[in-house]
Image (cartoon, rainbow, N blue to C red):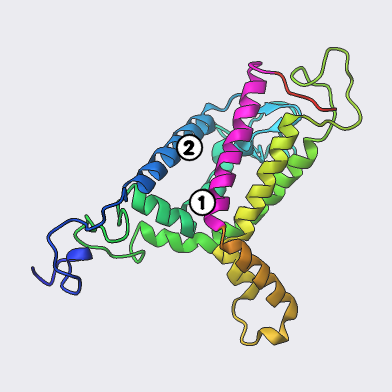
Amino acid sequence: MTDTQTGVRSPSRARITARTLRQDRWWLPPLTTFVVFASFVVYATVRAFSDTAYYAKPYLSPFYSPCLGDCVEGASDFGQPFSWWPLSAALIILIFPLGFRMTCYYYRKAYYRAFWLSPPACGVAEPHQKYSGESRFPLIVQNAHRYFWYAAIVVGLVLTFDTVLAFRAMPDEYALGDGDSGGGVHMGLGTLLMVVNIVFIWLYTLSCHSCRHAVGGRLRHFSKHPVRYRLWTWVSRLNQHHGRFAWYSLFSVAAVDLYVLLLATHTIDDLRFF
């Protein structure tokens, strides 16, 4: 064994020849993460590039919000400043929520273990010959997570606005019968899904480690900043469940988009409560 070896076979570690001494199904969690996360990536990529079936009044897919490109009528609540954009409208804003999730501390652990096997589990040999951490390109980009968090706050506000608009009652061939002119309040299954989604989005965003630093970092004495201390305490409690909120929000975003897709393609009708 030479000094150039790294991982669990480095000189400072126990000298065993087995790849791992673990007897449990240690490979199951990273395999599950790989299958679920890869499925979402494939689905989201197809939907983002399709540029179709992303709006069914009054529901706008979160993948396309805000819709700033050459969007269908009614989908652009903030105008179309990128109407010249030749590709899908989703690709204009995708970098912000995608960048926030891909640089997230929890997601780093998830896809490092599941996709790069670095390492696949505790006590299992590191398959790579050397590891430079996040000090070199491309992993050094992970340090931009705090700035993506600022963008995620804006995205969360926009999605909240979309959720409020989902309560609008308006003429819609998907949700209302012929001759119904709208008016009043719209409440359907899509509205409920959007409410659940935005709750999970905010729980995921506000439980972020960067949020915890923003509200309570760089303070020498919490006693002199009682408001920030209370906020830091609240965010710290949320932070304990950050990984759970990451998965919940991932599923809820996909669920809302799929529901809008089914409505826009006339596959189903919106289940209206009133």
Residue 103 visible in the current orientation: no
Q: Nearer the viewer, residue 5 or 121?
A: 121
The amino acid marked with disc number 1 is: Arg
Report crowding for label 2: few under 14, some 14 to 19, many 20 or more residues within 10 A (C-alpha). some
* Name of the residue lying farthest toward the right: 184
Residue 67 appears left or right of 248 = right
* Name of the residue lying farthest toward the left: 1
Residue 56 appears left or right of 164 = left
Picture layout, residue 75 above or below residue 101: above
Tag 1 residue: 101
Residue 131 appears left or right of 104 = left
**Residue at left offset 67%, top offset 18%:** 268
Q: Magenta region: which residues?
A: 242-268
The quadrant of the image that shows the C terminus is: top right
Question: What secondary structure is the stretch in magenta mostly built from?
Answer: helix
Query: Tag 2's secondary structure?
Result: helix
Residue 223 visible in the current orientation: yes
Instruction: Reply yes or no: does residue 102 show up in magenta.
Output: no
Residue 41's label in the rendered image is: none
Residue 70 appears left or right of 109 = right
Looking at the picture, how far across and down is residue 58, in whole percent?
Answer: 76, 30
Q: Nearer the viewer, residue 93 or 129?
A: 129
